[in-house]
Amino acid sequence: MKTFSVVNQKGGVGKTTTVLNLGAALGKKGRKVLIIDLDSQANLSRSFGIGKTIDKHIGTVLAREHQAKDVIINKGIDIIPSSLELLKYEKLISSEETYQFILEETIKPLQKLYDYCLIDCPPSLSTLTVNALVASDFYLIPLQPEFYSYDGLRTITDFAQKLTKLNPKLQLAGIFPTKYNPNARKRLNHDVIEHTKELFQEKVLSVYIRDNVSLAESPLNQTDVFTYAPESNGAKDYMQLANLIVKL
């Protein structure tokens, strides 16, 4: 099982959208996929119609109240959901001496059951994000082409680099623009992407996730973009991203 964290400390840049639709794209390519909602907002879980307050969720897994296999819900794709209570569990596990390894330990029994695991991280470089990165082989950074999203890229990569002391296999799989409008006249959009390419070179992927209404509408219909609008630009772009991921 290859594990990917989707991370950015800024909210609203497309982390949840990416986990939802990249997971679906990999599934359409015949891969067995597990997605994990590691955000207390539980937006990924809600995209599948899972309630915000449930008895079994990723928090109870991290607290070892439940085994990961017993918390998985199949919604066409397997998901370990989140809950509004996750922050309470985060405080609980952060007091443990080796808290950084808890997620890695709890999902280890699932290694042979899946080809890919995708983790939706919270919009912060917190205890939960540390756990995600320590458990991952790769991390992906969705970049909304605006200054505040770009400004935090070095912070994220420096943070991840420090964690390679705990997880030597961790690598940046790539940075990719989201909510991209190729017809926009905003000079800033172009400048942010060009500056990112100068800084990160080949780590900036050739895939641009275009601004597409279907990506916003599909979670409201409790499904992914491939089910909701298979011919949309959103579906095409996330399939292109999946094509790159399977080559890693």
Image (tube, rainbow, N blue to C red):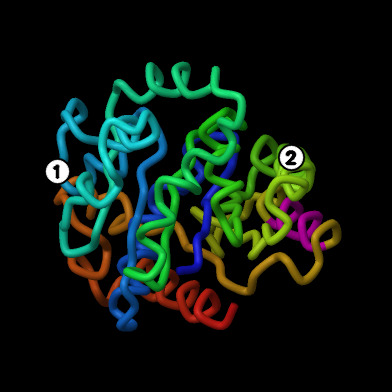
Prevalent SS, magenta region: helix
Quadrant position of the N terminus in the picture: bottom left
Tell me the kind of residue under disc 1: Gly
In the image, taking residue 233 as reference, residue 73 lies left or right, namely left
Quadrant position of the C terminus in the picture: bottom right
Tell me the kind of residue under disc 2: Phe
Q: Residue at x 75, y 38 (%)?
A: 155
> Residue beneath label 2, please?
159
Up/down of 202 relative to 117, above or below: below
Residues packed near mark 2 inside 10 Å, few (<14), some (14 to 19) or many (20 plus): some
Which residue occupies the extreme right position in the image? 198
Say if the magenta span includes residue 195: yes
> Residue beneath label 1, please?
49
- Label 1 with label 2: CB-CB less than 8 Å: no
Report the span colored magenta: 190-197
Helix, strand or loop at mark 1 = loop
Up/down of 20 relative to 126, above or below: below
Quarter of the image for residue 116 reads: bottom left
Q: Residue at x 36, y 43 (%)?
A: 37
Say if the magenta span includes residue 77: no
